[in-house]
Image: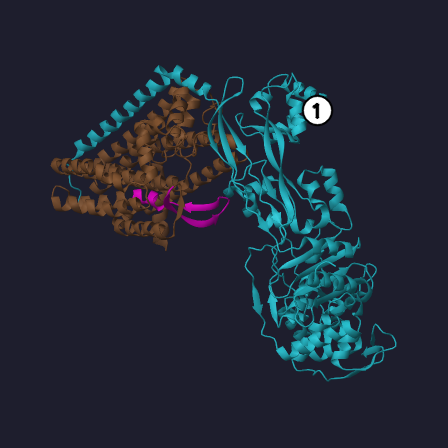
Chain colours: A cyan, B brown
Amino acid sequence: MPHKLDPNKNRIQILRLLVVFSLLLLIVALFRFQIIQADKYISLAAQNRLRFIRLSPSRGDIVDANGAILATSMKVFNLMGYPQDLMKKGRLQLLERIFLRHGIPISKKKIKDIIKKQYTVPYNAVTVLLNLTLAQVSDLISDPEFPEFLFPLPVMRRVYPTGNLLPHVLGYVGEITKEELENLGEKGYRGGDVIGKAGVELVYEDKLRGEYGEEAIEVDAKGRRVRVVNRKEPMPGEKVVLTIDLNAQSYAASLLGGRKGAVFAMDVKNGDVKVLYSFPGYDPNSLAWGLSSKEWKLILKNRDKPMMNRVISGTYPPGSTYKVVTAYAALAEKKISPNTTYYCGGAFRLGNRTFRCWKKTGHGTENLERAIRDSCDVYFYQVGLEAGINALAFWSRKLGLGEITGIDLPGEADGLVADPTWKKRTFGESWYLGDTVNYSIGQGFLLTTPIQMARVFAAIANGGKLVRPRLYMGRAVEVQDLGLSNKTLSFIRKALYQVVKSGTGRPAGRYGVEVSGKTGTAQNPHGEDHAWFVGYAPSKDPKYVAVALVEGGGHGSSAAAPIVGQLLSFLCNGSR
Amino acid sequence: MKKFLRSLFERVYALREMDFLTLVLVFLLFLVGLVSIYSATAGRGDIVKYFVYRQAIWGTIAFGAFLFVFCVGHERLLKWSAIVYASVLFLMALVLIAGTVSRGSQSWIDIGTLLHLGQVRIQPSELGKVALSLVLASWLSRFPPNKLKNFLGALAIAGLSGALVLLQPDLGTAAVYGCITLAALFASGALGKYLAILLSIVVGCMPLGWHFLKEYQRLRLLVFINPYLDPLGAGYNVIQSRIAVGAGGLWGKGFLKGTQSKLYFLPEPHTDFIFSVFAEEFGFVGSTIIILLFGFLLWRLLGIAKIVKDKRAKIFIVGISAWIWFQVIESLAMSMGLAPVTGLPLPFLSYGGSSLVSVGIALGIVQSIYVSTKKQYRLTLD
């Protein structure tokens, strides 16, 4: 590398001097602002009495398909103050005294904790008391000792007029947690904001939420509001219209009548959810307005699990309702035909094991239609063995079992569609034919949620289309054509019609609408059997599918079938 | 392989010949930055640790980049300057297509999550500052700008990256590129009349450029002239920042005691307005020390440029000095309301990974130049 002697050494020296000169200019400028004019700016900073208050928007209403209000917002008042004012000596004591005088017992220490929890900077207002009614606020303000550094701020609170009728659909709102704040930082949430915690409130949070406004106000030396400098109005949230029919929902609740279980109904063609009821439930009002941690623990510890949405998160063996899947699988794989007959003597022997039919005396010789009608177990043991476990698992999955249905609610359970690979992996055991026998009548390594079974029956009713259930009217309808054989489906529909007409499902057909469906009685290792009924109506031109599951309810025929029958009649004919 | 290891060992060994004064100055400035970032974000609750922690990690990464570049050596980088420049141009073009928009300009590429840093995005226009200095150094030493042809060639090369940042649009960075180019041309002996014509064209085109500015950019310039034009919008920052600096007084209000910076008056107190935060809490004394640190650093850098024999290295150092100088002047003047708001970081202090890594790389090259120069002098003395 040839190094030329540089003729421009001087130029670099010039640059150096320029740097020094420019930096000196900066120091001169600093000197002007920080020394000569320091007093002016120090007093400007001291007078900088801008305060920022966040204005909460009114959260969007949630209404049912007919416009009945399920969740709305109500105006109450919060008492606000600035930490820098509140924490001055003696002020907390004053507050304690005044609050007590007006019937609000709250200790000095508690107030201090409340302030500390919300503290960010001394200039940001914190909430000292919340959820005061207009009467309470006017009472407080008229107190001669009421301090000027406290001011009432109207805020919107969530109320659920329907109480504990559909908590699992609506969910509830609550104050944002630290974790949520970190995860949702990008969306402009702040501590103290209210956010959807479960159900529709959670799923459609972005729509319901609205936009917070902000008010910049100038205050005087005592913290009194002098003028509003800038105000951004809060934007109210959007209204969310649900597909739910509140009347039907409340009817379903009365039908279940305090028994543990789930009732669900939807449109067979587009998956519009009409009824989604799970009992026991809870009152979202109490959660939205704040529970003590003790009350929370009580709810969480409750062995009946009131927070669990049994329709979508409860997994149960489907019992005999699963026989339609067994039948379809065997027919589709051409292992049997509708005319295949088996003899039922009340029990079926496989090797040295005996599998009983629910009817101890046996059904005699049955064909497929009659076997579905009578829910003959022995018949289906053999159909299941003919089809084989892989075909059963394949068709179960095809019909949407073992995976979530995609309803717009959080916390859906997958259920379980086991196969030999699963058993090997989980228990390290091979699959026995006995497992298949159990499987074919919906027992054993098979777990479904009520909503999954409703979807299976909807597919049978609507000609083989798997619908995605939806709660929000604005959500796209998603229907997946499974390409099932129409001939087979119409045969199964005929059999399901017979179930209610002359078989085990007769109690479902007494309410003025022709119902097709299937009973189920699922063995429960922990106690009484679970009662199932899944059905659709009207049989000729199916509109709605409904499922009822009564935990420990005993026979599907007596416990669950009447619920579905009455609910379908209500949905098809309106209230009588 | 053995040869490679040997040369690597030599490079590592050469580290002890580094200019430690520069290193110490930079380290001090970085520490001041950490302190200021802590203070700037202290009002935001738990997030405090997050920013300081990330900045410390970025500082470590930048130091790693510094060592790496030092080991690669300036010779290689200057030889490959065209390739380096082309790849950075490619990244900058990519930003325009697939970049992330933040604060009004599309300058970032998301590269996913990394280590404990969470979401990481890089700003190729920061790397562009190093690459531009490199390529100008090679070009101008080979084709000295005492001929108009060479002068225009250098302008065309710089114009490529300049156009790409203007498209983002990032006016501040474009101005830095302009400053680097001008300084490089000046140091490489461009004829005075060329420079004079260039400057007058730039000044002459300013009214024309007004039409190309976005609304918010115009507003920033307008409020610079008169902050009270929009006292609660764009002008608010300028007014409040000046109050912050002025309220610092002689000694400052003390660490974490600044009230101005704890208000929400600055949208980015830990990046663009980091100096205001510092000046409010450490006053005239502290601010002057910062300026002196930068002064020593730039004096030293240009001093190295003076003694270096390799002309390319000389021009390169002038380029990066111009970059640091411009950002210091702009950032400090902006804090006092003496320059329009541009969003340029204050080197070593402002929160931001790309900026730290870029200066780390630039200083790695400078140190490499310094070490080799020292060796040459020693050889001549022998």
Say whether residue B145 is left or right of residue B335: left
Whether A60 is drawn above or below A330: the answer is above
Foreground of the two, A346 or B381: A346
Residue type highlighted by circle 1: Ser
From the top left corner, tell me how far across and down residue B361 is, in percent: 34, 42
> Image quadrant of residue A97?
top right
Asked if residue A491 can be seen in this view, the reply is yes
Q: Is residue B116 part of the magenta span, yes or no?
A: yes
Question: Which residue is at the far front?
Answer: A576
Residue B177 on image: x %, y %: 27, 40
Chain of the residue under the numbered disc 1 shown in the image: A
Residue at 74% across, 42% down: A297
Q: Horizontal and vertical percent for residue A75?
A: 62, 35
Which residue position holds label 1? Answer: A107
Q: Is residue A255 above or below residue A39?
A: below
Foreground of the two, A144 or A79: A144
Q: Secondary structure at mark 1?
A: loop
Query: Residue B196 lies in what quarter of the image?
Result: top left
Decide if residue A448 is in sight here.
no
Residues shaded magenta: B104-130
- Residue A167 in percent (x, y) is at 69, 49
